[in-house]
Amino acid sequence: MENGFKETIENQPTTNSDLLEVDCGKPASLTWQRQLNCIRKPPASFGASFKEIIHLAPLGFRLWRYTKEEEALGRTPIFDVFKKHLLTCDHGVPLGGIGAGSIGRGYRGEFQRFKLFPKVCEEGPILANQFSAFVSRPNGQKYSTVLCARSPEVPKESTGLGIESWDWNLKGEKCTYHALFPRSWTIYEGQPDPELRISCRQISPFIPHNYKQSSLPVSVFTFTLTNTGSTSADVTLLFTWANSVGGISGFSGDHFNSKMKTEDGVRGVLLQHKTANGKPPLTFAIAAKETSEVHVSECPCFLISGNSRGISAKDMWNEIKKHGSFDNFGYEECSPSEPGSSIGAAVAASLTVPSSSVRTVTFSLGWDCPEVRFGDKTYYKHYTKYYGTLGEAAANIAHDAIYEHSTWESQIESWQRPILEDKRLPDWYPVTLFNELYYLNAGGTIWTDGSPPMQSLASLGDRKFSLDKSRSHSDNATDTANQGDIAIEILERMTSKLEKAHIPLMSNAAFGTRLLQDGEENIGQFLYLEGSEYLMWNTYDVHFYSSFALLMLFPKLELSIQRDFAAAVMMHDPSKMEIMSDGKWVPRKVLGAVPHDVGLNDPWFEVNAYNLFNTDNWKDLNSKFVLQVYRDIVATGDKTFAQAVWPSVYTAMAFMDQYDSDGDGMIENQGFPDQTYDAWPVTGVSAYSGGLWVAALQAASSIACQIGDNASAAYFHMKYQKAKSVYGKLWNGSYFNYDNSDSSSSRCILADQLAGQWYARASGLMPIADDDKVRSALKKIYNFNVLKVKEGMRGAVNGMLPDGRVDMSALQSRETWAGVTYALAATMIQEGMVEMAFKTAAGAYEAAWSQEGLGYSFQTPEAWNTDDQFRSLCYMRPLAIWGMQWALTKPKLFTEEMKHGVINDSLYHKQHLGFSKVAHLLKLPSKEETSKTFLQSVTEFICRRVPI
């Protein structure tokens, strides 16, 4: 594929001379830092006023009823406003690559926020999951501690044999945590031995353009031990792990631990977890590398809590404390755990560190859960292309990571170091830029292998079939890798039969893989949640902001998402869904509308999980689709992609024609929150949706030019000129009005009023307004929305009245959105207002990431209000900071020279006639009509074959 990015690293052989030398014991030059004894108040969540509670009562009742109905069906509701979340501000860099599950880790040392299954987040820490250090000196001095600055609560029924018996005595004030995603470093200065410095570097395989390694569910921990004392130090580092996937799962029973097969000096333990509630099984592997200087021993099983017989957590701890290894530790053959009891495993690495010397020890944590289940559909994760689908690869994943992580680190360093060393940038910016990427790991991400879902044979119903040899099995007869494995052969036959049987079903799903041409790579399909509290996959109005991160770092995944939405545009799903705002029942998705999301409980098949409003009527989604598609075309140079999605682009533009009620070329909002600000009504021509529409018309024209459809290019260019003229009427002398109604917000200064301008400039299009007006509006926003709220230390508030007061007319008008603040800053950079841009974005940093801020690090919310209360932690939109990086780097764009001559009347009439007929057939039924009438009109049109 021709593109403006590096070719995939996994396809480029790496030689030792290509690798940067990295001292893994030394943190990067710029990092986010906290002392381990730093304890802050949890973030404060927003509360509605009494007036708002009364106003929202009907909506709240419908949401409560909807939540209960979904739960009764075994489905997950998109909002659970009644669920109590664990609020803390101690989060750090999470573990794992992309799309195979995530495990959070706090800066104080806790492993927490287990997101190993779709839609599931077990927020609390498992305190048995720890690293610990034991040190002894020749003079008899001994030191030991868990390397965590908190200790477990002692349960009332404690026998004294659990983890509470361990030495929880780390002095956090002497330890510092450094974070720069995907790496972190914890420096233990003189802890537990005052003459020993311990550095733990955590790294996960998040490597731009390296699609193989970045899909792996694994992290590596390298300890660097520096002995500053006059005597040698005997050190044992202990890695303990519970057989649990978070919450109370460790007590469900039938879990099993066993030693890993030793290979290349890598030793460890497998923890096989029999997951409850219909979720697939998962296996953890904890491992360490044995060398001539490091001895590794294992304790395959110890009892964390419960009444089962066996080695207790206290016994295990005391064995290391006394002997420094498990070599002489007698243990019985492990049997499955009993319900009500929790088991763990331990790996110990022992070594001697001579005086004034440095030694290293490497551990890894890998997990293997190849399946993703949505109802009766099963998908396989991307990493299974390299490690198989049988769920027996945890040991290999952990082993390979130990041997390959140095290459990862070199590649990560090559990516990050130039930005860290760019002296034009304020220190906070590169740190925040990289750390906001945590969301591509911890945002519930799923990355499939691109194959259609597996369904049980029962899904074939009464149809007759036979398990003949699959074509793939026949074609690969010379591949002996799996020869003799009858299970794999049978699975291949089942997969082939089910794929063929479900072809009609797949054709009605938002599967963008169907748009791939022969020879094009199927990179798989990618999902990430709108937020940890707003459960919808690939929320498109928000992806509009966050997509720059994927485009710059993993462009193939970005194109995959766009293909899915291109396929979704052409879907029509008449099944009914209830809208929470008014209680009406509407079709789930109509032809021509870009869906809000690709679903939740059955993604790609049941789109539009969002149900607060009918998003078929939203005015920003279709424009955002066209703008993202064009930006991605010119960013990658992929004209095959352009050809494949052009019908969807044309259809999406034609669908919007129904919202131009007066035929002036400009769409109008309809008096309700019909765009991404879904709690803030807008009426008539608006700065936000109108600006996006002007830019989208220009983008549609340019896409047509890219694929050689010159007539459509000229037609859309004329519509662009008309719409731009109307948009200009919103100009009031210093900025663009919120809308052209007479509402209280009509003259509101909207921070996001130039969203269309942002994308136009980012994609190499012409501006949607005159340069002097754009700069004037940006200055107005800066002076009002930014500087008039807490002296510019909170970012840009969404709405500000001309008299300098925050617009309090709606919930969202008085909020600051980090993602919008970053997008605004990106717009300023594109207009040459760089200093103003960084001052604007610095407010979002101060609120979310600074030591004196609001405690949002590694969980940046959608919003905070003027009372410093958040809404929706751990949210997608703040990835928009990569829009700033796009503006700063000015990537090469594969644009075509636009030649817009005067289109003659005859050609214009022909184009307009065709466009109008398509638009007419896509027009939503009026309140008096039904969806049946709509379908009948489409059928009649096709039958008549009216020429265009």
Image (cartoon, grey):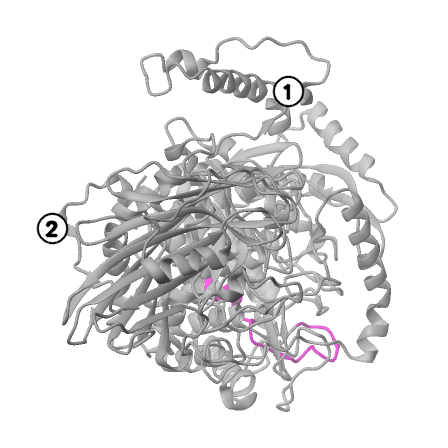
Q: Which residue is mark 1?
A: 457
Percent across and percent down for residue 38 are 46, 80
Percent across and percent down for residue 696 are 53, 55
Observer-nearest of 660 and 91:
91
Q: What residue appears at the point 48 percent right and 71 percent down from the top-left corner?
A: 857
Q: Residues within 10 Å of mark 1 (few under 14, many from 20)?
A: few
Observer-nearest of 405 and 438:
405
| 445 lies above or below 512 | below
Using the rendered view, name the quadrant where residue 23 is placed: bottom left
State the mark number for residue 17: 2
Q: What residue appears at the point 65 percent right and 61 percent down from the top-left corner?
A: 675
Name which of mark 2 and mark 1 comes first in the sequence.
2
Q: Amino acid under label 1?
A: Leu
Is 639 placed left or right of 88 in the picture?
left
Is 58 placed left or right of 76 in the picture?
right
Observer-nearest of 281 and 31:
281
Give the magenta part as a residue range.
739-759
Q: Are marks 2 and 1 in contact (CB under 8 Å)?
A: no
Secondary structure beneath dot 1 equals helix
Using the rendered view, name the quadrant where residue 384 is placed: top left
Q: Is residue 742 magenta?
A: yes
- The N terminus is located in which quarter? top left
- The C terminus is located in which quarter? top right
Disc 2 to disc 1, C-alpha distance: 52 Å
